[in-house]
Image: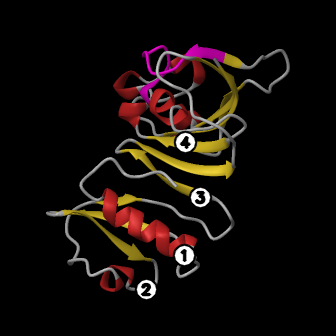
Amino acid sequence: MQAISSPAALTVGRAAALFAAGRSSQNLQVRRSTTGCNLLRKGGNLHRQLGETSFSGEPCTYLVSSRGLSGGRVSMGIEKEQVKAGSGPKPQKGQTVTVHCTGYGKDRDLSKKFWSTKDPGQEPFTFRVGLGQVIKGWDEGVLNMQRGEVSRLTCSPDYAYGAGGFPAWGIQPNSTLLFEIEVLEFK
């Protein structure tokens, strides 16, 4: 489970603990309020169980799935959903990381693939993490993954290709993108 980089990290941690303890198997939604982020269990009142205040402001999403996936917000522009757990340490800034990746979001449709290292003729992708060689969503997301882990990173436009998009791949300006990434190795 990843912590949200905001004043709500403790609140999210408490919700994650409830989920891990089996007291909540629902998707959770985080909403920004004047005091940070508060939690709401869809169809329930988890925020009251946690003693939180009422909601106001724009919603942001924090997903915890009942299908055995774990997830969270890596930063304000990245949501992570773990598909398969990895093991060992996480890569450090500046290390060379090799990943398999499939990207979705062509023509603003998160079901449309625009690129994959698993396509015929493609190879795993290698880069130095945390140094700006890739989009911000990858830099921050991969730093929070272990060797062998497979996770889905949903990246807001400012953590993807931003206002310019990536026309060669059919990525429109200001598109949210989804990447399924598997960390193969790092050194």
Sequence order check: which comes first, mark 3 or mark 1? 1
Label 3 and label 2: CA atoms lie apart by: 20 Å
Where residue 60 sits, quadrant-wise, is bottom left
Q: Amino acid at mark 2?
A: Gly
| Residue indicated by mark 4 | 153
Q: Are marks 1 and 2 in contact (CB under 8 Å)?
A: yes
Which colour style is shown?
Answer: secondary structure
Mark 1 or mark 4: which comes first in sequence? Answer: 1
Q: Disc 4 and disc 3: Cα gap in Å?
A: 12 Å
Q: Residue at x 47, y 51 (%)?
A: 2
Residue for badge 2: 44
Residue 50 covered by magenta stretch: no
Q: CA distance from mark 3 to mark 1?
A: 12 Å
Rendered position, 139 above or below 38: above
Residues rendered magenta in the picture: 126-136
Q: Secondary structure at mark 1?
A: loop
Is the residue under label 3 in contact with that under label 4 (CB below 8 Å)? Answer: no
Q: Is residue 132 magenta?
A: yes
169 and 75: which is toward the camera: 75
Looking at the rendered structure, the kind of residue marked 1 is: Gln
Q: Quadrant of the C terminus?
A: top right
Predominant secondary structure in magenta? loop
* Coordinates of residue 155 in the picture (x, y in percent): 46, 39
Residue 32 % position (x, y): 25, 61
Say whether disc 1 or disc 2 marks the residue closer to the N-terminus.
1
The type of residue carrying mark 3 is: Ser
**Of the residues shown, which amino acid type is indicated by label 4?**
Leu
Residue lying furthest right: 120
| Residue at the disc numbered 1 | 26
